[in-house]
Amino acid sequence: MKAGDILINYTPFGHSDWQTIVSDIKKFGSQGKKTAVVSTINGDANVPFYKELGNQGVSAEDIPVVAFSVGEEELSGIDTAPLVGHLAAWNYFMSVESPENTAFIKSWKSFIKDSKRVTNDPMEAHYICFKMWIEAVQKAGTTDVDAVLEAMYGISVPNLTGGIATMFPNHHLSKPVLIGEIRDHGQFDVVWRTPGTVIGDAWTDFLPESQVIVADWMPPVSCGNFNVKTGTCSGQNY
């Protein structure tokens, strides 16, 4: 792969004028090379971005987009017919079929009294972590932050996709990884998922400087930036 095979573009949070950027994507993809877009656009900025993809006819067949932060909520207010086939990677989709998810969606819609509202991955994350917090408080016998934090490690609760989420000493959960394909009704079809849950890793193994660093908040390490090669912590100890 050559440097010219990759086009990188950063935008500020809340960016809304995507005409030029989407035009650049189309121009880049017209050079005859297989082209895909990896999108890390966050929040509401996704709405005008995906609208512009539709306006300029950027189809998943020609230039597929795989996003790490677009979900049902962002797509709920736009026409997704031109966006069918674009992808998103999450740990949860509303369309996942499981007894836990069915019950959650029913309870959520009953609570807000709006059958058209959608759920999404951040909602499941909140659902999981609040249940973990309750168990940690009961285990610690107090709501003191430090005591609850220490009690949190090892707690497991059901997720909404039919599995179990566990809190590990690196402050990350175990979750499944799912890839969903946008449908014309604004939901996602799950086209791929890990066989089970994946333990979250605070440091990537794909960068040499990060390969030797781990996060482990349990004694004797108690550090989020522990270098296993030098045996030192470059972060704050607790």
Image: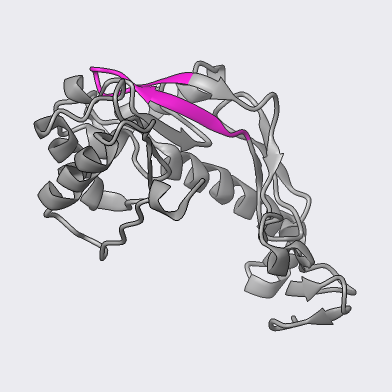
The one nearer the camera, 230 or 140, is 230
Looking at the rendering, the stretch of residues picked out in magenta corresponds to 176-190
Q: Is residue 210 visible?
A: yes
Residue 237 at x, y percent in the picture? 75, 82
Say which quadrant the C terminus sits in: bottom right
Q: Is residue 223 visible?
A: no
Residue 97 at x, y percent in the picture? 50, 16
Image: 121 above or below 140: above
- The number of numbered discs placed on residues in the rendered structure image is 0
Q: Is residue 182 magenta?
A: yes
Query: What is the basis of the colouring in this image?
Result: one colour
The one nearer the camera, 197 or 213, is 213
Whether residue 46 sits left or right of residue 89 in the image: it is left
Residue 144 at x, y percent in the picture? 65, 72
Query: Could you tell me which residue is drawn at 57 percent across and 43 percent down?
Result: 128
Instruction: Identify the image quadrant of residue 189.
Output: top left
Image: 69 above or below 8: above
Query: Could you tell me which residue is drawn at 70 percent across and 51 percent down?
Result: 167
Query: Could you tell me which residue is drawn at 59 percent across and 46 percent down?
Result: 131
Instruction: Identify the image quadrant of residue 73.
Output: top left
Whether residue 113 sits left or right of residue 198 in the image: it is left
Residue 80 at x, y percent in the picture? 20, 25
Image: 69 above or below 137: above
Whether residue 193 sits left or right of residue 54 in the image: it is right
Image: 144 above or below 18: below
Instruction: Identify the image quadrant of residue 70.
Output: top left
The one nearer the camera, 1 or 23, is 1
